Amino acid sequence: MPNFRIKLSLFLNYFVFAILLNSSGVAIAQVQDSFGVKEDAAAWIDPCKDISIAIASFLLSSYITRFGYKRAMLVALGIVTGACLIIPAAPSFVAIKLLFVAVGTCFALIKMSVYSTIGIITKDSNEHISLMSFIESFFMVGNLSLYFIFSFFIDSNNPGSTSWMNTYYLLGGLSLLAFILLFSARLDESEAKGDMQKPASSEFIDMFKLLATPVVLSFIGAAFFYVLIEQSIQNFLPTFNKKVLMLPAALSIQMSSILGFSTALGRFLAGIILKKINWFYVLTVCLLLAVLLIFIAMPLAKNINPGNIHGWGDAPLAAYIFPLIGLVLAPIYPAINSSILSSLPKSKHGLMSGLIIMFSALGGTTGSLITGYIFHAFDGATAFYFTIIPIAILIMLLFLFKRLQKKGNGDNGIIVSPIGGGH
């Protein structure tokens, strides 16, 4: 298989960062017991991650092509390895926030590099969306794994324990393994270098020119609201399981894995379905089904008797139904990302990846904070009912994105081809 080692490296990088990034939901649930913080205060863990992602993407996307994608990934893995091995030795709420600042900053480098490397090692748009979906699916495998890994270290009988933080020692070891594999892989980046005589400041200006393109603006809006929805659910699902469905701490983390499994399955199935059916119809139906699942699951979350729940077999139906929302939300992000990236010259992938990551991070931190405050002021069911509003906005933005795809934008040389069949 061509580029096998570099592809394997990308998969492992994404697997490690999937666990690190999405452990924010576990951390939000656990710091409330370990360090006595409230839901609205715990919600700031996610902004520590997402604001760091946004700032790093904004500052570095214009320079990452010059610095080198492989080199950027090695720096990110090195920093995260050190943070994971040091911070758990001094357990505190501040230490957790610092850890997620490091993880967020490094993920910006990883994601920009991974997205841009996909463009280098694929030959056409079909191979591009296939590899993108596969890597995003592998990201969700990491997301699924984290719930079982963390639950192994959680002491349900001692709510104030910080034993769950020892998981980061294991993740530091995985990050070191990813560093070694990447270091040994070869990647020819010459095709993505573009005009190296061009000043870096002009590339920074090019990013804003790209952002001013109507089709890119509509895409950025869709990415923002998708991640807002995704992170609202993902970051507070363990807390919802524990405080609304009354599951024991370890079980609340384990059952959150249903979301990771359903999302991974959804992205795998999307790779098949999007080859035959127009992407807009698939994603619109998915979003409508997401609303339906919210209306089905939230009423089932009322009047739970905590004394009767000891394992998976005792859990209320809502604990199984609501996480299935991942199945229908899953196809959206890789589909729209691949569409916009495959339409651009490879030399612009770094800039576009920076914009994707920046606005995705802003969407994630917005969703986490809103959900945290609603959860604290009202209850978990109300917080998840709120996600219906951004779902409605996202449907409208996808419709606008679809129209602009057909029109293209001659002024900026960007013509976006629709994904899948049914043109």
Image (spheres, rainbow, N blue to C red):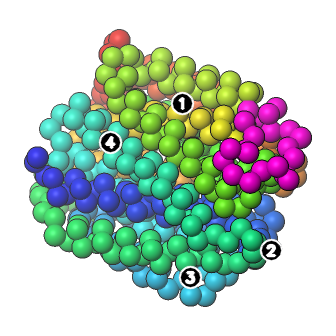
Disc number for residue 134: 4
Residue 8 image position (x, y, % from top left)? 23, 56
Is 181 placed above or below 261 here?
A: below
Mark 4 element type: helix
Image quadrant holding the C terminus, namely top left
Which callout, 1 or 2, points at the residue further toward the start of the chain? 2
Q: Specify start and end residues of the magenta stretch as a single range.
A: 297-317
In the image: residue 387, left or right of residue 256: right
- Give residue 292's position: percent from left, percent from top: 68, 24
Q: Secondary structure at mark 1?
A: helix
* Classed neighbour count for the residue bearing mark 2: other residues with Cα under 10 Å, few (<14), some (14–19), many (≥20): few
| Residue sitting nearer the eye, 80 or 101 | 80
The residues bearing labels 3 and 4 have C-alpha atoms spaced at a distance of 32 Å
**Image quadrant assignment for residue 51:** bottom right
Q: Residue at x 17, y 58 (%)?
A: 5
Q: Earlier in the sequence, mark 4 or mark 1?
A: 4
Sequence order check, earlier mark of 2 and 4: 2
Provide the residue designation for mark 3.
88
Q: Amino acid at mark 2?
A: Gly
Q: Nearer the viewer, residue 345 or 321?
A: 321
